[in-house]
Amino acid sequence: MRFRLIDQAKKAAPVHRLCKVLGVSQSGYFAWRTRKPSRRQLDDMVLLAHIRAQFATSNETYGAPRMHVELQEDGLDVGRHRVARLMRDNGLKALQKRRYKKTTDSNYGGPVAANLLDEDFACDGPDQKWGADISYIWTAAG
């Protein structure tokens, strides 16, 4: 991680100064630059290609446990935690479908309340519209 930081910042400052600030040796940095990927890194790249292919096939709905089962069915001997790490490090997160929830019933067919005011809301004072015409307003609560 430190060597990668030095590699990114080497245009801003000399390499020997960056190495001194981060507490690493210059020879370690230059050895890191020329080092070939390890066997595990190569295996991870091959495995990641398989994971990406299965992930696309599943419409991005498979998480690490299901992906692990699919890879084992394909004949790859790999652990679930390794699959989870590769998926997490590469931003492969399973999409969860939201369930549709019906919130209103616009076609309920229930009775419509009578229009007792005939849309005449004007009055001269308080409590005039609550006369003999409207003695009770029915509600679902009773």
Image (cartoon, rainbow, N blue to C red):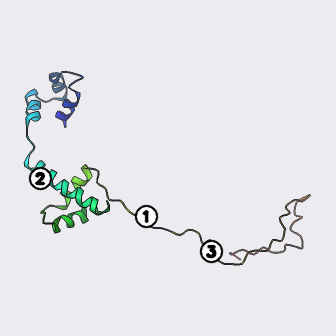
Picture residue at 85% right of the left edge, 72% below the top = 134
Q: Which of 75 and 129 is in front in this view?
A: 75
* Real-space CA distance between mark 3 and mark 1, rounded to the nearest whole angstrom: 24 Å
Q: Which of marks 1 and 2 is nearer the N terminus?
A: 2
Q: Where is residue 42 in the image (x, y as percent from the top left)?
A: 11, 49
> Given this view, does label 3 or label 2 mark the residue nearer the observer?
3
The numbered dot on residue 43 is 2
SS for dot 1: loop
Image quarter where the N terminus lies is top left
Looking at the image, is 81 positioned above or below residue 42?
A: below
SS for dot 3: loop
Question: Seen from this angle, which residue lies furthest right?
Answer: 124
Q: Kindly identify the amino acid type of the residue bearing the numbered disc 3.
A: Asn
Picture residue at 83% right of the left edge, 64% below the top = 119
* Real-space CA distance between mark 3 and mark 2, rounded to the nearest whole angstrom: 59 Å
Looking at the image, is 36 positioned above or below residue 57?
A: above
Q: Where is residue 62 in the image (x, y as percent from the top left)?
A: 29, 63
How many residues crowd around disc 2 within 10 Å: few (fewer than 14), some, or many (20 or more)?
few
Q: Kindly identify the amino acid type of the residue bearing the numbered disc 1.
A: Arg
Q: Which of 10 and 45 is in front in this view?
A: 45
> Given this view, does label 3 or label 1 mark the residue nearer the observer?
3
* Real-space CA distance between mark 1 and mark 2, rounded to the nearest whole angstrom: 35 Å
SS for dot 2: helix
Q: In which quarter of the image is residue 106?
A: bottom right
The numbered dot on residue 111 is none
- Reading the image, the residue beneath label 3 is 107
- Reading the image, the residue beneath label 1 is 98
